[in-house]
Amino acid sequence: MKWSGTRLHWQKLGLALLLCGVSLPPVAYAAEDFDPTSHADIQRWVDDVSGPDVSRDAVMQALRHAQFSQEVLDAMQGAVERRLNWHEYRDIFVQPERAREGVAFIREHRDAFARAEREYGVPPAYIAAIIGVETNYGQYKGDHRVLDSLATLAFYHPSRGEFFRGELAAFLDITLDQGISPEAPKGSYAGAMGYPQFIPTSYQAYAVDFNADGKRDLWTDPVDAIGSVGNYFAEHGWRRGAPVVTPADGPETPPHSIDFNRTREPYVKVARLADVGVHPRGKLERSNVIPLSLALESGEYRYALGHENFYVITRYNHSYLYAMAVTELASRIQASLDEVD
């Protein structure tokens, strides 16, 4: 039996309400296969996410195939955003080859990119850069079974279990609704999926059927992925034609009185930055920015000022390093496109 045939957003599923009364402590780590029938707390979670439109048997059948993964838990502790400087992170994701492949990806799907820009206001280079950083344009979408990743994180993560229980419920809704075996999809260790690496609740909320074939397929359809990234940015407040980052000059080391690299909406006035020697290269129309100090190989710092569109990129991944890598890759892709045009 499948879940409800409608593509419900997680808000409509009421997961926040369903899960708010379920407080599951992390289960003791184990190497054996994940067995939901052996844990009363997991049984209660299944009861809560089941209902008239949700088959309890379908949820249990899926969970019985889930396997615990210590590798997933270890990967969560060692995410690169937590341990790399800017120049190290940049060198992973912003290389000439990835920029060239981004240009080729845009050319291959030129019509989809042009339509996404018309409908959502997001330039092709930025949509391509997201997909380029996430999966190298679909060449590497992850090798972890999403079911295993989410089940492990939902019931074993020491602090974020509630979040991942919501993602697990959304994942089961997506796969069972679309007639996909929950055992089949692969993705990242955190349960992100497809060309753009959407987590399940983002898949439900922002994925679009951009080629109008009746499916929202981010696993195998690059056109749906292109439209979905554009829609994600638009829904999070992307401003058509507005800047993303303004380069800046500053002192040898970042002044301690300024809180740099926060992934918040623009929060520091340009005049305040000028007081400590950080100056934009050019005139800024808006007074509030996100001040960025980027550590270079030499030990020096590069400065930049993020705008509202930079903040939107951080809604995709809450890391200033990630948003800067996307911005740099998009700039290189756009420069190559401009040379050809």
Image (cartoon, helix red, strand yellow):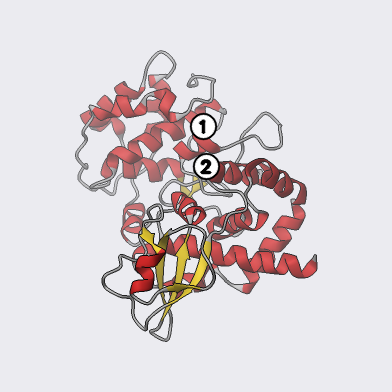
Judged from the image, the secondary structure of the residue bearing numbered disc 1 is: helix
Q: Nearer the viewer, residue 211 or 74?
A: 211
Residue that badge 2 annotates: 185
**In the rendering, at what x and y percent does residue 135 appear?**
56, 56
Q: Nearer the viewer, residue 332 or 175?
A: 332
Q: Give the left or right position of residue 21, taking residue 327 as reference.
A: left
Crowding at mark 2 (Cα within 10 Å: few <14, some 14-19, many 20+) = many
Crowding at mark 1 (Cα within 10 Å: few <14, some 14-19, many 20+) = some
**In the rendering, at what x and y percent does residue 325 appear?**
51, 65
Judged from the image, the secondary structure of the residue bearing numbered disc 2 is: loop
The Cα–Cα distance between marks 1 and 2, rounded to whole angstroms, is 9 Å
Q: Earlier in the sequence, mark 1 or mark 2?
A: 1
Q: Nearer the viewer, residue 302 or 269?
A: 269
Residue that protrudes farthest toward the top in the picture: 52
**In the rendering, at what x and y percent does residue 296 appear?**
43, 80
Residue that badge 1 annotates: 175
